[in-house]
Image (spheres, grey):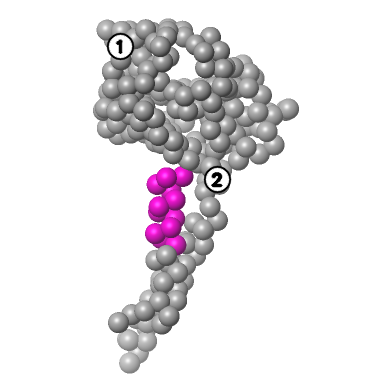
Amino acid sequence: MMGFQRYPVIGLALVLAFASTSYVARAGTLPDGTNDFIPSFMGTKSADIDILSAGLTLSGSNLLFSATLNATIANAANTYVLGIDRGLSTRNFSAVNLPGVTFDSVLTVTGAGTQGGMDFVSGTPISVPAGTFQISGSNITASIPLSLLPLVAGGFTSPDQFLWNFWTRGNVLGTPVAGNPGLADFVPNNSDASVVPLPTALPLFATSLGVLGLLGWRRKLKALAA
């Protein structure tokens, strides 16, 4: 029977595969309660704007975002907003009793997949590349280039210091609710969360798989030569 002592690289690869897969699945993901719309929300309390979880990780030159809602996302009148604080905290939601939610830029996607964004430091729109946000069933994912969120003077000195919050905006009879009354659900509820850097184990895992492939190739060559 094959054992880890006889094939240490295989053992290492398997261990790292389990650890890294488990980490990616939970890294930076925050749960949120069901039907916990904020009291000031004036739109329709539909399950597709009820956040169940969201998370943001840093991987190289990209931020990896994921969120799960309580129903299939399909209503074009709803908007899903990722707020990023690069250290200046120029905006907050004190007006709806959520002063802990601070941000200086936002990236948005509607239920129909229309993407956009705003940099409140420079006062300019953020041009989000097509396909950055992906909607599948009740899930939203995104691979966000850090070039969309440049460091700002007086702010954080590194993207791994960025803070984030995710919220939804609702509608009434297909018409988006404007302003603060349209704010529906938040995660975290009244604070910002830290971006979670992916661990150094992931590159090591990839290296281990490469070594494993090389060993398999060498074994095939030996078998052909025998």
- Give the alpha-carbon distance from disc 2 to disc 1, as whole Å: 36 Å
Which numbered tag is attached to residue 210?
A: none
Q: Main secondary structure of the magenta part?
A: helix
The three-letter code of the residue at mark 2 reads: Pro
- Residue 206: percent from the left, percent from the top? 47, 61
Q: Which amino acid does label 1 sit on?
A: Thr
Q: Earlier in the sequence, mark 2 or mark 1?
A: 1
Reply above or below: 131 against 174: below
Q: Which of 190 and 47 is in front in this view?
A: 190
User: Quick one: 35 or 46, which is closer to the camera?
Assistant: 35
Quadrant assignment, res 99: top right
Q: Position of residue 121 (x, y in %)?
A: 64, 20
User: Callout 1: 10 Å neighbours few (<14), some, many (20+)?
Assistant: some
Q: Is mark 1 on a helix, strand or loop?
A: loop
Corner quadrant of residue 181: top left
Residue at mark 2: 197
Q: Is residue 179 left or right of residue 156?
A: left
Residue at 27 percent across and 7 percent down: it is 173
Residue at 41% from the left image edge and 72% from the top image edge: 11
The percent coordinates of residue 108 (x first, y second) are 45, 23
Foreground residue, 66 or 100? 100
Q: What stretch is highlighted in magenta?
A: 16-27
Q: In which quarter of the image is the C terminus?
A: bottom left
Q: Which quadrant: the N terminus? A: bottom left
The residue singled out by tag 1 in the image is 44
